[in-house]
Amino acid sequence: MALIPRGDIPLSHDPSARYLPWLLGIMCYFAVLASVGAVISHQLAARWDFALGSVVTVQIPAAVTEGSDAPRLSQAERMMRQLPGILRLVRVDTSRSVELLAPWLGAELAADLPLPRLFDLHFAAPPEVDLKQFEARLGELFPGAMVEAHTQWMSHVAKLTRAVEALGLTVLALVIGASVVAVIFAVRTSVSIHREVISILHLIGARDGYIASEFQAHVLKMALRGGLVGGFLAVATLAGVAAALEPEAVDSANLIPTLLGGLPAGIVEWILIASAPVLVAFVAWIAARLSVLGALRKMNP
Amino acid sequence: MIQFDKVELRYPGSPAILSDVNFAVEESSFQFITGASGAGKSSLLKLMYLGLKPSRGRLSLFGQNAATIGRDGIPALRRRIGIVFQDFRLIPHLSALDNVALPLRIAGARESAIREYVPELLEWVGLSGHFDSLPHTLSGGQQQRVAIARAVIGRPQLLLADEPTGNVDDGVAVRLLYLFEELHKMGTTVLIATHNRALVERFDHPCLNVDGGRVTRVRGQGSRRSEPRPVGAATSGGTSNPSKHRHRG
């Protein structure tokens, strides 16, 4: 199957040869942005699911007097460390809690308040332990102790990021659909313009596939040309957005990590971006073939 | 090779263009088809290259019933046929060389073979100085020879020519017919449709006449001897050995 136009049909002079590369370039631009948006959302959702879904916060009411409940506190910490799957236990410093409350309550009031003791329990994976039961056991040592899994409030954020991801994929699908429609329209117009040449080719023994391959090669050439320009502009846009959000990112060549919220971006993301023009070109190539074959079947061979 | 058996051709709602057509074309034969303009000669040829299908009757091409040849089978059949159209039907944006190369490219021939055989054939038909010429820059006779070269480059078993001398003067017309005779000598079956009876009379080949939609045989094989003529007399320029063209591909 020809990938380079043979020139049997003078397609390069068609009106579509002027507008289709631009159109496909714009489509490719949006395809890259949409796919990058979908990837960012997906990675953020996965990261938050993992990072926050595997953290549990334990809240123990403040002691009546400083150090009066130290033995019980040690026992509670031992209970926490014995939980299955726990990686580490972080005791949140009281001064850190005061720091967090100060902007709302004022530094003095925050310092005077009897603040509860907070512990972050980090698990290798979302904990499978029955947290309600664990809370009840802690409650025997410290009445009013609370155990809170972050997954509860994280689910709302996760839903939002999944929605953004779905939106990105929807835009990508629409862009591909619009590209297909544009190619079909352009190809059918070209078939109509070159009806006479096609008829001659048929009469000297050309199969429909031979004629279709000429159109395919022409569309592929235009789609790659437009797609590369569109893809380049999309990357430039991403670089601009990254620079606006975090100027040092551009200098440090950490564009994608910045966009992915600090996650190190692998080769996969770059392959995805580079493949967008190729994907658009491939879809256009297939659409051209099916469209030409459909149009040729309506003509006498 | 071709067998017409009670063939009728008509468009829906119109009177028959051809009716009760019965004749056979033997392999390696040379036949003329004569008749007035509009008598149905072109329609008869169109039936033979499946540009049209019979409305009634049976048409057999290369042993296949035309009625059962589907769309996918037509290209393979047409590659066995070379067609010279009355209006040449050259592709205007392609050079003479590329027009002639088309059947080979369509058949998937190697470019090296195309570069070897196409110039050779163009020289044979006397167009050695016009390889890169576009059709509109060539005279009627030159375009006709490009069309003939395109029709024979793929070594067809059957050559159909529709009024091949209609756009050229008598001298060129006779030379073109000598060219067809050369092809016939190489084994190609040749059918030439023409309204020029005077020209037909100069050659000793069977002749069919189309009149009022009916086809009748007006002259059989050997009814008249053609005058002796030199090999390559058809060409105005090159006279390379035409037998070389028998083994290309």
Image (tube, coloured by chain):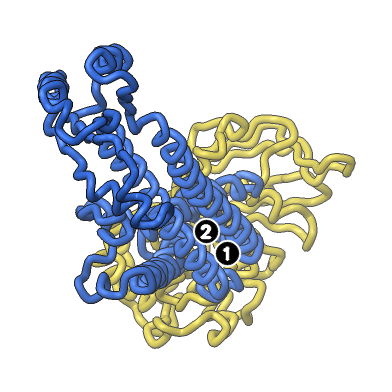
Residue A26 lies, with reference to residue A98, above or below; the image says: below
Residue located at (65% from left, 76% from top): B167
**Disc number for residue A201:** 2
Secondary structure, mark 1, is: helix
Residue located at (36% from left, 78% from top): B123
Residue located at (41% from left, 49% from top): A38
Q: Nearer the viewer, residue A234 or A188?
A: A234
Q: Nearer the viewer, residue A93 or B46?
A: A93
Q: Residues within 10 Å of mark 2 (few under 14, many from 20)?
A: many
In the figure, the shade used to draw chain A is: blue
Secondary structure, mark 2, is: helix
- Asked whether the viewer can see residue B185, the reply is no
Instruction: Calculate the distance from the C-alpha at mark 1 to the C-alpha at mark 2.
Output: 6 Å
Q: Which chain gets the yellow colouring? A: B
Query: Which x, y percent locates residue A173?
Result: 51, 47
Q: Nearer the viewer, residue A184 or B146?
A: A184
Circle 1: residue type: Val
Circle 2: residue type: Leu
Classify residue A194 as left or right of residue A127: right
Residue picked out by circle 1: A197
Query: Which x, y percent locates residue A71?
Result: 10, 23
Classify residue B57 as left or right of residue B242: right
- Residue A48: which quarter of the image? top left
